[in-house]
Amino acid sequence: MSSSIPRSAAVAAVVSAALAAGLLAGSASASAEDGAGVRIHDIQGTTRVSPLVGQQVTGVTGIVTGVRTYGSRGFWIQDPTPDANPATSEGLFVFTSSVPTVAVGDAVSVNGTVTEYVPGGLASGNQSLTQLSKPVVTVLSQGNPVPAPVTISSWSVPGAYAPAGDPAAGGSINGLTLKPRTYALDYYESLEGTNVRIGSSRVVGATDPYSELWVTVKPWENANRRGGTVYGSYEDQNTGRLQVQSLVPIAQQPFPKANVGDVLAGATEGPLDFNQYGGYTLTARTLGTVVDRGLERETTDKQHKNELAVATYNVENLDPSDPQEKFDALAKAVVENLASPDIVALEEIQDDNGAKNDGTVSAAQTVKKFTDAIVAAGGPAYDWRSVDPENNEDGGEPGGNIRQVFLFNPARVSFTDRPGGDATTATGVTGRKGHAALTVSPGRIDPSNAAWADSRKPLAGEFVFRGRTVFVIANHFGSKGGDESIVSHHQPPNRSSEAKRLLQAQAVNGFVKQLLAVEKQADVLVVGDINDFEFSGTTKALTDGGALYPAVKSLPRGERYSYVYQGNSQVLDQILTSPGIHHFEYDSVHINAEFADQDSDHDPQVLRFRP
């Protein structure tokens, strides 16, 4: 990559479509009717949408505070003589499409069209970025001082996250007057395009492949002992998070590598942008220095000989074309960090040629390469069970055919095979004398249920440990794709993907209840990438009727996470236990999500108990 931002370089004005949809309706101009003599704060206005949207303006003056030569090319200008209204930003992005010819410190006069660009498109629900498009730029002078930055700090960002959306506008906050002293999103919006600064700040989202990281200006806000900021409820957003990118192309200056808990020390300064991948973003002219705080990968305890250790691990689209280094690193983690669990439920195992879309569905080569790597790392010779999916029916990359796979250590645990399992055959529950059993093992739960359309079907298996039957159900629920982000102009955001996961959770919960109806004290573990939080409706549906308990809730609140997204440490991967499992030890083993160097983007989970 030649730049540090956007994954999508294409930038298109969406004003006409937005106006047609009534989403970005402007109000009458407060300035001259011909658009002359307009100031930046007149363009920005006191809401999220410019009162001059769609209008031609001339002679808009300001000092250049930042230049972006890649991605969404353009520059920011700022009025050095602000008005007295804290709701009106004094900064503005000028979208040039080609590489800008201005420099920081230039005083310029710009003619152009006021537009509202929605990163990700209208359907994304994202807020819009006010900008000038199709500009004609005149440089008036050079070498001027850049307007002093506004310092974003713990005391300047309000504790409340966002106002409630206007019911008359479909829950949108676009038309609401900004209250920057009351709401964090309003505060950041009031600084859109403005030259801002942060001081030394803790990293809460590691450097990612797109050369960006996340910091918090509120170090106490839902903090955990490893340096992250925990996402604990829909009502308690972490207001101090801010994305940081660099305006310097990485070919000229590599972006620093940081892990969660590190510190971005010194001043970081530049215009405040808004983009599709995180919302408000400090695009730094001047970037602080990363101070390594030495975050280490965790190692879980070894199970005792009479304890069964069950783990779940999303290995992120693993297939034989991945470099051997990835297999070796994942294998080492299973052996060393997870202490060679007796059973490992894997998610995102791809077929034998990965994303090549040629009808291949077998994953035997993928699993063999992985289990061989585990042996080479000093681990057990795991056996395995799975059910091949139908081609391209389970979501994920086209041709990849991801599925769940059980690994188990035959020296410690046995698998009860009952033939007949395939992609479309459902396993059921049978039993005699109060002992439950699966009709098919391994087998899929209700694969014809519409809840699993284009999604991974749950894999159920029956194991025996020290004479006791244990049922494990491996899951990979539907993703959050299609959900609006927490910086959506709808507040609360629309979370459309929850509807599918709710149906999936109800199906799994119903199956567990069938097992418990036959054997009240059956040992049942529901594991995997649930793709939802421990406080979500999905988890509530899984636990309905007391059939299951989310084991992550046994951890202190600061340790409840398996994934870091946009600076929020949050739960996606879970292990849930049936009532018969009375005592257990649970560990979310943090080896990936907090680190710039990752073998997967998920942290594995391990539960140990005595059946």
Image: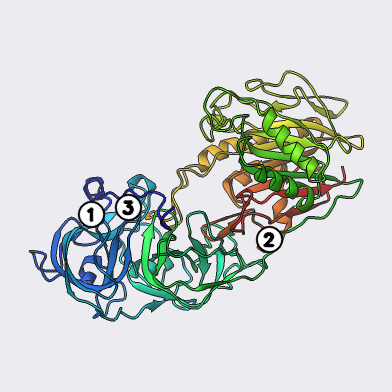
Identify the mark nearer the N-term, 3 or 1. Answer: 1
Which of the two discs, 3 and 1, sits closer to the camera? 3
Whichever of callouts 1 and 2 sits on the residue coming sooner in the sequence is: 1
How dense is the environment of label 3, judged by Cα within 10 Å: few (below 14), some, or many (20 and up)?
many
Residue type highlighted by circle 3: Val
Residue corresponding to mark 3: 118
Q: Secondary structure at mark 2?
A: helix
Q: Amino acid at mark 1?
A: Ala
Tell me the CA gap for discs 3 and 2: 36 Å
Kind of residue at disc 2: Glu
Residue linked to disc 1? 25
- Residue 312 image position (x, y, % from top left): 71, 44
Q: Nearer the viewer, residue 184 or 194?
A: 194
> In what element is the residue under mark 3?
loop
Identify which residue, 243 or 532, lies in the foreground.
243
Q: Which residue is mark 2?
A: 559
Say how many tags the image has.
3
* Residue depicted at 51% across the width and 58% down the height: 566
Q: Earlier in the sequence, mark 3 or mark 2?
A: 3
- Work out whether 305 lies above or below 406: below
Mark drawn on residue 289? none
